[in-house]
Image (cartoon, rainbow, N blue to C red):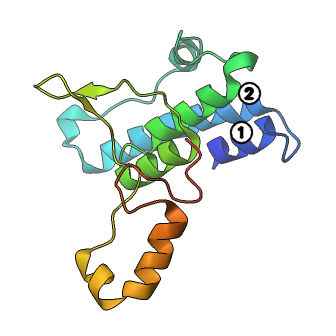
Amino acid sequence: MRYTRAEAIWRGWVEGDARAAYEEGIRRSVDWYVRAWNEVAPSNVQLEMPSEEELQALLNGPKVQWDDARGLELILTQKWVDFMLDPLEAYSEWRRTGFPVLEEAVSVTGAPMTPPRRFVFPQSEAIDNAANYQEAVSRMGGDEADGRVWWDGG
């Protein structure tokens, strides 16, 4: 929730300190993942909580350190990283925001591989619900995987 709060602050929707919320989000994320790991890992591979010095080093890292000009990108990239155990949510956040900026994948033939933006309708929908299917496809500009849903601003 800290990243969502940081985004809301950065966008001017609520008052507060976006940097503080962002950094608190990173701290809580590290804490959560260490605890989650330790609950399932064998006792000989338990993790120690990072020290304050180690956390500060993380927060001061070149790809993490707060920069007012890149605030939204930093917040949303860390939010995406935090969702590593919930890939559908990470995917949805990427579609909603466009962050992180991902490198375009290239197939073995050299052709660009564009990630899908939405799920296409099943063929049965076009057959069994033709009128509504046609209306929806018309409003969306097609039934293509690279088409966008209404909230896809990325």
Q: Is residue 44 left or right of residue 78?
A: left
Residue tagged by mark 1?
6
> Residue 144's x, y, as percent?
35, 56
Residue 31 seen in the figure: no
* Label ID, residue 143: none
Answer yes or no: do the residues labelled 2 and 1 have beta carbons within 8 Å?
yes
Mark 2: amino acid: Arg
> Residue 66's x, y, as percent?
67, 18
Residue tagged by mark 2?
19
Tell me: residue 94, above or below residue 53. below
Q: Of 126 and 46, which appears nearest the observer?
A: 126
Locate residue 12: give its quadrant: top right
Locate residue 114: give its quadrant: top left
Q: Is residue 115 left or right of residue 2?
A: left
Mark 1: amino acid: Ala
Q: Is residue 131 left or right of residue 11?
A: left
Residue 135 seen in the figure: yes
> Residue 95's x, y, as percent?
49, 46
Residue at the image position 54 percent from the left and 67 percent from the top: 139
CA–CA distance in space, label 2 to label 1? 7 Å
Residue at the image position 85 percent from the left and 47 percent from the top: 14
> Residue 61's x, y, as percent?
53, 11
Tell me: residue 59, above or below residue 131. above
Residue at the image position 33 percent from the left and 41 percent from the top: 115
User: Which label's residue is closer to the chain start, 2 or 1?
Assistant: 1
Assign the C terminus to one quadrant of the image.
top right
Dot 2 falls on a residue whose secondary structure is helix
Q: Is residue 17 left or right of residue 72?
A: right
Q: Of 72 and 105, which appears nearest the observer?
A: 105
Dot 1 falls on a residue whose secondary structure is helix
Q: Of 89 and 58, which appears nearest the observer?
A: 89
